[in-house]
Image (tube, grey):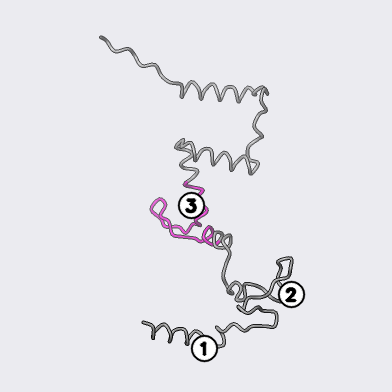
């Protein structure tokens, strides 16, 4: 076991065994551990960074990945035919259908999207009177969804 550890230590000390692309070279401004020196204010000297390899070329940030996924068109069968629709459009159709089923979270999300996009008027201020159309719509809603009285069961 001790022989294996000694051989491993010797191989780690032999930096020239590494390919030059993987070998980190020390510059005059690097400390003894190979890390770039920092100024007294904590910043690196000009031309030196802690992230030597940097971000790989072609890598994308999270928003770019999200946008690509949203815009990707996938096949969907609708009414017996297959269409290619973007995932964003499928998401909005599903959200809208759930709102039409009166699912509270979906309805709130659709109303929020409509309000934020300016498709709804501003909400009435507290104490502001409703218009005739609004009052009639609310009255119809409350009569339609009011709790119904159940007839008493005979004893």
Q: Magenta segment: does it hold 18?
A: no
Residue 53 as seen in the image, left or right of residue 42: left
Residue at numbered disc 3: 90
Q: Magenta segment: does it hold 93?
A: yes
> Closer to the observer: label 3 or label 2?
2
Which image quadrant is residue 7 in?
bottom left
Q: Secondary structure at mark 1?
A: loop
Residue drawn where x is 64% and y is 23% of the image: 130
Q: Position of residue 104 (x, y in %)?
A: 48, 36
Residue at numbered disc 2: 46
| C-alpha span from label 3 to label 2 | 49 Å
Residue at far bottom of view: 16
Picture layout, residue 130 above or below residue 45: above
Residue 8 as seen in the image, left or right of residue 21: left
Circle 1 packing at 10 Å, graded few (<14), some (14-19), many (20+), is few
Label ID, residue 83: none
| C-alpha span from label 2 to label 1 | 30 Å
Is 83 or 107 nearer to us in this picture? 107
Q: Position of residue 114 (x, y in %)?
A: 60, 41
Of callouts 3 and 1, the N-terminal one: 1
Q: Secondary structure at mark 2?
A: loop
Residue at numbered disc 1: 14
Q: Which residues are magenta?
A: 68-94
Picture layout, residue 87 above or below residue 58: above
């Amino acid at each position: 076991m001790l022989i294996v550890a000694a051989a491993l230590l010797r191989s780690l000390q032999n930096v020239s065994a590494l390919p030059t692309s993987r070998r980190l070279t020390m510059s005059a401004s690097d400390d003894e551990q190979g890390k770039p020196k920092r100024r007294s204010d904590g910043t690196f000297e000009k031309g030196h960074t802690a992230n030597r390899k940097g971000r790989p070329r072609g890598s994308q940030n999270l928003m770019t990945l999200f946008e690509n996924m949203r815009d990707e068109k996938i096949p969907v069968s609708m009414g017996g035919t297959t269409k290619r629709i973007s995932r964003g459009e499928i998401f909005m159709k599903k959200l809208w259908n759930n709102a039409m089923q009166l699912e509270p979270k979906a309805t709130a999300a659709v109303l929020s999207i409509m309000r934020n996009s300016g498709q709804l008027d501003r909400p009435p201020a507290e104490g502001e009177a409703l218009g005739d159309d609004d009052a009639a719509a609310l009255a119809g809603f409350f009569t339609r969804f009011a709790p119904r009285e159940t007839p008493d069961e005979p004893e």
